Amino acid sequence: MIEIAPLQVYYSGLLFIPRSSLIRARYLKNIPWVTMEPKVTDVWSSLIQTLGGHTNGVKSAVFSPNGKVVASASWDNTIRLWDTSTGKQCVLLEGHTDWVNSAVFSPDGTLVASASRDKTIRLWDSSTGKQCGVLRGHTDWVNSAIFSPDGKLVASVSNDCMVRLWDTSTEKQCGVLRGHTTWVQSVVFSPDGTLVASASSDKTVRLWDTTGKQCGILEGHTHGVNSAVFSPDGRLVASASNDSTVRLWDTSTRKQCGVLRGHTTWVRSAVFSPNGKLVASASSDRTVRLWDILTGKQCEVLEGHSRSVRSVVFSPDGKLVVSASLGNTIRLWDTSTGKECRLLEGHTREVFSAVFSPDGKLVASASRDKTIRLWDTTSTSKQCGVLQGHTSLVKSAVFSFNGKLVVSASNDYTVRLWDTLTGNQYGVLEGHTNCVNSAAFSLDGNLVASASGDKTVRLWDTLTGNQCGVLEGHTRGVFSAEFSPDGGLVASASWDKTVRLWDISTGKQCGILEGHTSGVNSAVFSPDGKLVASASADKTVRLWDTLTGNQFGVLEGHTGEVFSAMFSPDGKLVASASEDKTVRLWNTSIGKQCGVLEGHTGEVFSAMFSPDGKLVASASEDKTVRLWDTTKKTTIEIIETHDSIKIMKFANDGTHLHTSRGVLQLKSSLHSGGGNPHPLYVTDQWITCNMKKLLWLPAEYRLSFSVVNDTANLIVIGTVTGRVIFISIDFTALRAAYLQPSVNVTVIPSKGPLGISSLVGCCR
């Protein structure tokens, strides 16, 4: 943080450090303009360093033999070396032309070998970063590469069905191990370096000597094998398979000597404990299991992960196990009791791997969020974090119409209600069995409708938090649910190609609107509730009569998927936003196109009419919002938004836009003296006021979705780690410099509908 935003250390540092910090307790009162601070952990977590620099997901991270350096392999085509004491990147290894799947140190730490989808293995000098060899020969992606115990050989495996051996001194291929009939997933040397074991999707593990001769085929699995490892004494091999089993093999007889059954789906990896008495296995069934090698019995089931577990590793002393999950978390477990002793939270996307340092004091984790994180395994601190709310990505958050509640929808299958006055969780609405895609309040705020991938819409009483209706009938996931203006109906849009109408009083389906030939992304009511407009991946918008359920019109013209459609306030027009980079206007009385609004350079996610219907605002993948004159079909204003906005709505007075990132001030209202004087906005790393940087957000507090209540100056952020945080600003206590609108515009000669020069530019 000091490097990224040194002047923010005082404000952001105080706001986001743990509650037990003496510095926070002593000095937090010196930020009087924050009237509601975000909820933070009570004590420091185990996270020591976040190593950021990769521009794509990090597939793996490994310690050097002396534990002083971490090597990370990334989908950004690079390997990076990091100093574990400072967290600084010390070497950048560039040369691969496609994703790097793995990187490993040689036993003496002087070399790094990397395996890539560009079909090569590359050798690097770990001290200088200089490439010292390119090993070519594979004809498909290289999945992994590993050094022999003496460092003289490298073994690599590929989707070309081959295992290849390479001499590190000459950089020449010295063996091609043929026999597998499909992809080879992993390779490992025996502890004495005399054998190689390879695991393949062809359901076998094969043993080879280092001359390239096959000396055993270990057959028995009924599905592909993901990994194979030798026991510390080299007498056994453990293999993990998609057939839900781990199998043990005797390397001298090449016979199966144990089948470890208990997992209910794919086993991703299996490892021996340092003393060879236990095996730990990681599975897509969300568990880690410990097995006694002598008896073949399951001795512990380690439960707690919310998604598939991708890797598991023993600490050097065998007392701990660390597991990495697609649920964004790493967990530490005590092998003697089977109890979880630490939850390591902070990653904002799936964690692919986690490994111990040689002394066991650190864990390095690699994630799709582009970071490597270092964790202290000796810390006894506990982090409350996501245990107090959502446990996965928050997909949407919406204020009730009176602003007193927020409803959030999440991939953790729950809907949650929050009190905006206190920031406390008001209710957990549980019942969905799949991700919740959206949630909406009824006009009176008494009900919430939630749409889920479990094919249902559920109705909830906001006063009690009780489920008061399950609307079943869709045959695929439901994307959205919308109340009619009078609150008597709900319209739901689904990937089953239909829109369905539901009677709220009875919970019964009262209409199936069929006609789309692909999934329906959204459905909205006209202002008088007599029509529904549905937007679909079939490139059309369709109008429906809510009384009869009949199709009223097919609005054709888009050349790409239509993401959303919206009625004008008088119901005479529909604006549709599409993948084809345009917004189109349609006359609802005749069902004809009456305008094409072109100018965006990326997909348009949403379009919204102003309260008087004279303007349309459109939000695009090109990170701009455009304002259009609906009469002249011309651009009035372009606002750069730093990030792509998916959802937005005009304020009642038409002077600013509420978006999924915050409030955008329209420049026309600045010149006319109207509008909200203090628009708050959330970028990837910052909360801004009038587009001036106000608060820096640490990585675990960054948003997947946000809403701003401008009347209360309240920001609600649904974070990528599952938190929902509240921050309220008192502008009377804020420095005057933040209160002045920041205007940096280019004037367009043509006149806009408000009688002023049209403005193009970015608020900075």
Image (cartoon, rainbow, N blue to C red):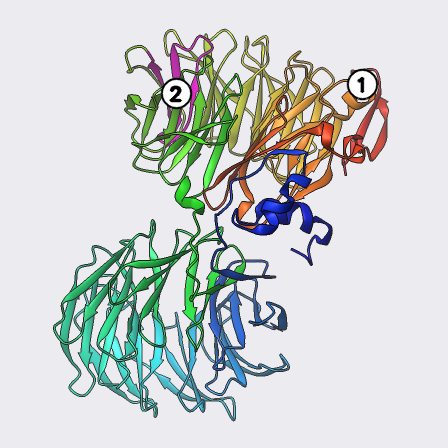
Q: Quadrant of the C terminus?
A: top right
- In percent of width and height, residue 583 lies at 62, 27
Question: Does residue 109 lie above or below 489 as drawn?
Answer: below
- The image quadrant that residue 547 belongs to is top left
Residue beneath the point at 74% across and 18% down:
632
Provide the residue designation for mark 2: 462
Discs 1, 2 touching: Cβ within 8 Å: no
Answer left or right for 758 relative to 494: right
Mark 1 vs mark 2: which is more N-terminal? 2
Element assignment for label 1: loop
Magenta run includes residue 440: no
What amino acid is at disc 2? Answer: Thr
Q: CA distance from mark 1 to mark 2?
A: 38 Å
Residue beneath the point at 33% across and 54% down:
308
Residue beneath the point at 24% across and 67% down:
336
What is the number of callouts on the image? 2
Answer left or right for 23 relative to 700: right
Q: Nearer the viewer, residue 673 or 510?
A: 673
Element assignment for label 2: loop
Provide the residue designation for mark 1: 673
Q: Nearer the viewer, residue 105 or 541?
A: 105
Q: Quadrant of the N terminus?
A: bottom right
- Main secondary structure along the magenta-highlighted residues: strand
- In percent of width and height, residue 121 lies at 50, 77
